[in-house]
Image (cartoon, rainbow, N blue to C red):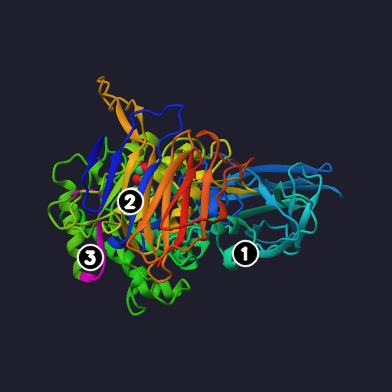
């Protein structure tokens, strides 16, 4: 038996392999009188970027795909010609009739013949379908310009995909010969079960019309125009996240300087947003989710923004050297200062005034700015150190209270926070839960700004949730040091072609969404932590034998290891006195735990338990079985200063004790 002597917590590993025999009880002794750390109030947050159709085809409410006809230079992707009742016509991309310089391509619809009863038009198939729901008001709009001899009307309708029925429609009677925006509300009646449809704009008489920025929004969260999808916002709101790290990830970087996140071009009227090629994840972004929309998303969910700024390193490291510190980098430093000014500047500043013009007079709260993303990939000696110093000096000089996050270790300046990333297997996380126990407490704080157990796709399975939970006990125990943590990626559209990165927290299609088991593990931890970590000693920790994988670029098989299968952390909410005992059993066996609470006057006999469990690590939730693995809340009796609980196999439990 090996005893690990740690200041705050002690762990004693008992057995070396899991046998068929019921395991010996784990002995957990909690010292309610001894606080070992303060839980960071911002410990649990969210990380987001445009990946896996997170915004377009995801959170961002827009239902029309390729609304400005720029997704493919050669063909109007996701648009098709509708010819009915003997009507004939053609559609084509047209660069000779641009709406403006930002939206240089329009769609030309030529109606050649349209006798009575005929119609000719264009249909959009949405992001894997346009969702049609009963009694729903959709806001539709488009820009149009008619040729001489055509003045409308144009019909706009939400229809069955084969056009056999319209669920909602409206007519725009007159179309002008100059570009003009037309807006209508499309209200559905009773449609039965929600279904996938299409959006059609059509004419009944011959002539030519050009279209651009064709848009359809369902009701959005808080009814914001250009807003977010309510079911996904609800899933996020239910996690009570403290912050949002955005806009990346790789998305902030781009593969080239030209394709970094263009925050300036993501502002203002949608007709002024050209969108950009998101070559980090290989699809075009409409930039409908722009800088202001990120900030309003934070506002809506009471999250503080953690703003990542582009810092000179792109993803095409073969062909693009990082921008060297000095005069060449200065424009990017200025961009970052401007971006911060847009977020927090008063309305007398140029970018604060721009924010007010865009509809948000009040500055947003901002405490953290991150300089770049994953700059440990920058192999040019000294490059990030120098780039970081230039950003650091400029930001600290102009905005002294802001905390500055480095994406890897630097020596040129002392960052306030370092952003660590971990993508691992469940076993790797289990083996590494003491990662931060002995870390230096006098240096920068840590943000674990991306992490996930990558098991299961498109969304993580129960085994992954167990690995996550094990890792979270370690982060929480060390949350005097780890001020923020956020899982990544957050979202995935589960349709074929929707996923660029496997294992994502929340899945959806056009109609429904679901939380993965890992989502529920996050939620349980985020909602139940209080403000203080209590001292805890653990004996008889069960373990299992694990063969670690070969390191990358090595043929040497590492020796097998014993990895624990039981994990815990204990916290307390000072105000209410509730003690949260988190217990994670990653094994296939029922695990008894003897819990002793010392240093307290009393432990109330009744408490509560929240449990997430299943019968196999491979069990999961999916778009067709969204609620297979869900947390179960129950009342618990028989609690006392010493009591025993049995943990279900493959389970995450939070015991809520009332301790005085
Ligand atoms: O989360 C997916 C990607 O992983 C992020 O964009 C990047 O920062 C990391 O490499």
Quadrant of residue 578 within the rendered picture: bottom left
Q: Which residues are magenta?
A: 398-409
The residue pinned by badge 1 equals 181
329 w.r.t. 380: above or below: below
Single out the mark in the foreground, 3 or 2: 2
Q: Are marks 3 and 1 in contact (CB under 8 Å)?
A: no
Please tell me which of labels 3 and 2 falls first in the chain. Answer: 3
* Side of 553 where 161 appears, left or right: right
Image coordinates of residue 376 in percent, x first then y, are 23, 43
Whether residue 402 is in magenta: the answer is yes
**Residue 488 at least partly seen:** no
Separation of residues labelled 3 and 1 (CA atoms): 41 Å
Disc 2 residue crowd, few under 14, some 14–19, many 20+, Cα 10 Å: many
* Image quarter where ligand 1 lies: top left
Quadrant of residue 467 within the rendered picture: top left
Q: Residue at x 71, y 47 (%)?
A: 197
Q: Which mark is residue 395?
A: 3
Please tell me which of labels 1 and 2 falls first in the chain. Answer: 1
Separation of residues labelled 1 and 2 (CA atoms): 51 Å
Q: Which mark is residue 475?
A: 2
Q: Are marks 3 and 2 in contact (CB under 8 Å)?
A: no
Please tell me which of labels 3 and 1 falls first in the chain. Answer: 1
Q: Quadrant of the N terminus?
A: top left
Q: Residue at x 61, y 57 (%)?
A: 215
Separation of residues labelled 3 and 2 (CA atoms): 29 Å
Q: Residue at x 51, y 49 (%)?
A: 520
Image coordinates of residue 525 in percent, x first then y, are 44, 54
549 w.r.t. 597: above or below: above
Residue reaching furthest bottom?
348
């Amino acid at each position: 038996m090996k005893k690990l002597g740690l200041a705050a917590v002690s762990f004693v590993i008992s057995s070396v392999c899991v046998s068929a025999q019921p395991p010996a009880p784990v002995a957990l002794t909690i010292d309610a009188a001894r606080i070992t750390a303060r839980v960071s109030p911002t410990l649990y947050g969210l990380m987001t970027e445009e990946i896996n159709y997170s915004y377009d085809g995801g959170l961002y409410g827009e239902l029309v795909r390729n609304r400005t006809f720029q997704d493919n230079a050669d063909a109007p992707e996701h648009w098709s010609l509708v010819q009915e009742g003997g009507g004939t016509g053609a559609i084509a991309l047209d660069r000779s009739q641009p709406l403006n310089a930002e939206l240089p391509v329009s769609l030309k619809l030529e109606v050649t013949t349209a006798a009575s009863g005929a119609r000719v038009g264009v249909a959009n198939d949405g992001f894997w379908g346009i969702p049609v729901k009963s009694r729903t008001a959709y806001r539709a709009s488009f820009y149009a310009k008619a040729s001489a001899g055509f003045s409308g009307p144009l019909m706009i309708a939400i229809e069955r995909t084969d056009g056999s029925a319209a669920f909602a429609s409206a007519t725009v009677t007159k179309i002008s010969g100059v570009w003009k925006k037309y807006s209508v509300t499309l209200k559905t009646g009773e449609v039965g079960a929600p279904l996938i449809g299409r959006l059609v704009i059509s004419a009944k008489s011959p002539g030519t019309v050009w279209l651009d920025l064709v848009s359809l929004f369902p009701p959005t969260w808080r009814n914001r125009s250009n807003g977010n999808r309510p079911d996904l916002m609800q899933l996020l709101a239910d996690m009570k996240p403290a912050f949002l790290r955005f806009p990346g990830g790789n998305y902030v970087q781009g593969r080239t300087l030209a394709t970094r996140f263009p925050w300036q071009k993501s502002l203002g009227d949608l007709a002024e947003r050209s969108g950009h090629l998101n070559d980090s994840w290989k699809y075009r972004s409409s930039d409908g989710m722009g800088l202001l929309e990120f900030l309003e998303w934070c506002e809506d969910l009471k999250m503080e923004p953690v703003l990542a700024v582009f810092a000179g390193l792109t993803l095409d490291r073969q062909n693009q050297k990082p921008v060297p510190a000095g005069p060449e980098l200065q424009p990017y430093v200025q961009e970052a200062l401007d971006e911060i000014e847009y977020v927090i500047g008063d309305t007398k500043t140029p970018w604060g005034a721009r924010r007010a013009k865009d509809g948000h007079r009040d500055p947003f709260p901002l405490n953290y700015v991150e300089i770049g993303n994953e700059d440990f990939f920058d192999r040019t000696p000294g490059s990030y150190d120098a780039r970081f110093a230039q950003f650091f000096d400029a930001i600290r000089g102009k905005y002294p209270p802001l905390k500055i996050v480095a994406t890897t270790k630097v020596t040129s300046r002392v960052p306030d926070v370092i952003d660590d990333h971990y993508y691992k297997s469940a076993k790797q996380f289990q083996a590494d839960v003491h990662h931060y126990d002995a870390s230096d407490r006098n240096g920068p704080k840590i943000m674990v700004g991306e992490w996930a157990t990558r098991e299961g796709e498109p969304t993580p399975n129960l085994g992954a949730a167990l690995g996550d939970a094990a890792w979270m006990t370690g982060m929480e125990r060390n949350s005097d040091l780890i001020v923020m943590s956020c899982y990544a990626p957050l979202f995935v559209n589960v349709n074929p072609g929707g996923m660029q990165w496997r294992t994502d927290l929340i899945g959806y299609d056009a109609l429904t969404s679901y939380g993965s088991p890992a989502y529920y593990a996050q939620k349980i931890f985020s909602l139940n932590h209080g403000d203080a970590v209590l001292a805890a000693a653990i004996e008889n920790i069960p373990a299992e034998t694990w063969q670690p994988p070969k390191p990358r670029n090595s043929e040497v098989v590492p020796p097998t290891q014993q990895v624990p299968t039981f994990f815990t952390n204990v916290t307390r909410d000072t105000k209410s006195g509730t003690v949260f005992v988190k217990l994670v059993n990653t094994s296939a066996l029922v695990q008894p735990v003897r819990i002793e609470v010392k240093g307290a006057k009393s432990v109330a006999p009744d408490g509560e338990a929240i449990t997430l469990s299943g019968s196999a690590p491979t069990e999961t939730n999916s778009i067709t079985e969204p609620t297979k693995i869900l947390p179960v809340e129950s009342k618990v009796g028989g609690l006392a200063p010493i009591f025993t609980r049995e943990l279900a196999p493959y389970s995450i439990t939070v015991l809520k004790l009332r301790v005085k």
